Image (cartoon, grey):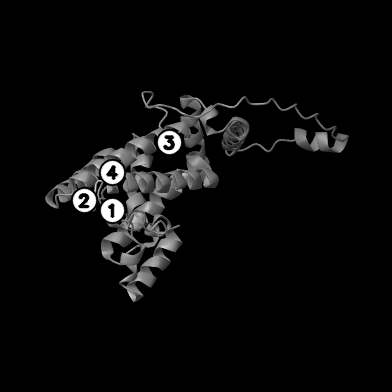
């Protein structure tokens, strides 16, 4: 999706008026095709490119939790929620809101990742100073809100708040934001079927002898811990495979993230 957005920036730079034919606005509700084309209305510029980098950065880490299919499903919901609500708000006839480019989805990804990782901190480059990620995102949201107020785009503020609220429920139903118990969880839990345990294979005498020989050294404890982490990760992935991400408890959800990060560092 990041690559598609970059390509669309190049094309829109070559044909500047194309952006106006792709975006979705209140006065474009009679053109249903724009419901599909507005994510391609990406203008070229420093801030759009910087925002696209953060979309890729936080989206990649969110994808590690949801998986590729889960991430695609969440982005599909983000597109659908923004499109449907934009159509509904557009019926008011004020020309708001305007959906133009993948930048509309930046907040849907960044806010979700930061909300799902409340302990995350941002560090200031070349210093040892850091601050909570939620505080940095709150400042950015506040600045964007003040810009919309200055532009008298009050309906857009209500529209964005409504989109984020709906997407928070979607994320909660997909197994994220487990620490926010007050959010509704609309997921239908499936009964997990117990798989029969595989019968152990018989080993030859030579194989048993080789397995009994253990190399000792300072790395032995690290190898044991690594094997235990891999085994536990396999258990959690098997549980997700049979019952979905929402089948994990909040403790198991945090354990999955810790194991993924630790094994990635190793």
Query: Does the rendering let one see residue 130?
Result: no
| Kind of element beneath mark 1 | helix
Q: Residues within 10 Å of mark 1 (few under 14, many from 20)?
A: many
Are the residues flagged by discs 2 and 1 in contact, CB closer than 8 Å? yes
The numbered mark, 4 or 1, whose residue comes first in the sequence reads 1
Q: Give above or below for 53 relative to 128.
A: below
Question: For mark 3, what is the residue?
Answer: 170
Can I make out residue 148 in this image?
A: yes
Quadrant in the picture for the N terminus? bottom left
Q: Earlier in the sequence, mark 3 or mark 4?
A: 4
Q: Position of residue 258 (x, y in %)?
A: 47, 35
Of the numbered discs 4 and 2, the one sitting upstream in the chain is: 2
180 or 98: nearer the eye?
A: 98
Q: Nearer the viewer, residue 107 or 265?
A: 107
Q: CA distance from mark 3 to mark 2?
A: 28 Å
User: What mark, if any, has residue 26 been given in the picture?
Assistant: 1
Q: Residue furthest right?
A: 205
Q: Residue beneath label 2, please?
A: 94
Q: Which residue is mark 4?
A: 160
How many C-alpha atoms fall within 10 Å of the one at disc 2: few (<14), some, or many (≥20)?
Answer: few
Q: Secondary structure at mark 2?
A: loop
**Separation of residues labelled 2 and 1 (CA atoms):** 7 Å
């Amino acid at each position: 999706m990041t690559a598609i957005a970059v390509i669309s920036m190049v094309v829109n730079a070559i044909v500047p008026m194309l952006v106006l034919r792709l975006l979705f606005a209140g006065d474009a509700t009679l053109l249903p095709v724009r419901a599909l084309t507005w994510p391609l209305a990406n203008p070229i510029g420093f801030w759009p490119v910087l925002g696209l980098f953060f979309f890729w950065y936080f989206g990649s880490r969110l994808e590690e939790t949801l998986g590729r299919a889960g991430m695609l499903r969440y982005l599909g919901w983000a597109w659908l929620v923004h499109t449907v609500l934009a159509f509904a708000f557009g019926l008011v006839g004020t020309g708001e809101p305007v959906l133009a480019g993948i930048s509309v989805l930046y907040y849907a990804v960044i806010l979700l990742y930061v909300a799902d990782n409340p302990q995350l901190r941002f560090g200031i480059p070349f210093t040892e100073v850091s601050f909570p990620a939620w505080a940095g995102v709150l400042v950015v949201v506040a600045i964007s809100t003040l810009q919309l107020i200055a532009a008298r785009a009050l309906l857009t503020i209500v529209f964005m708040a409504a989109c984020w609220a709906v997407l928070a429920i979607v994320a909660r139903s997909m197994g994220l934001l487990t620490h926010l118990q007050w959010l509704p969880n609309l997921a239908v839990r499936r009964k997990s079927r117990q798989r029969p345990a595989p019968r152990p294979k018989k080993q030859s005498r030579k194989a048993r002898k080789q397995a009994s020989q253990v190399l000792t050294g300072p790395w032995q404890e690290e190898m044991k811990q690594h094997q235990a982490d891999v085994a536990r990760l396999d258990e959690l992935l098997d549980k997700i495979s049979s019952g979905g991400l929402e089948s994990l408890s909040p403790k198991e959800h945090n354990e999955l993230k810790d194991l993924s990060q630790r094994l990635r560092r190793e």
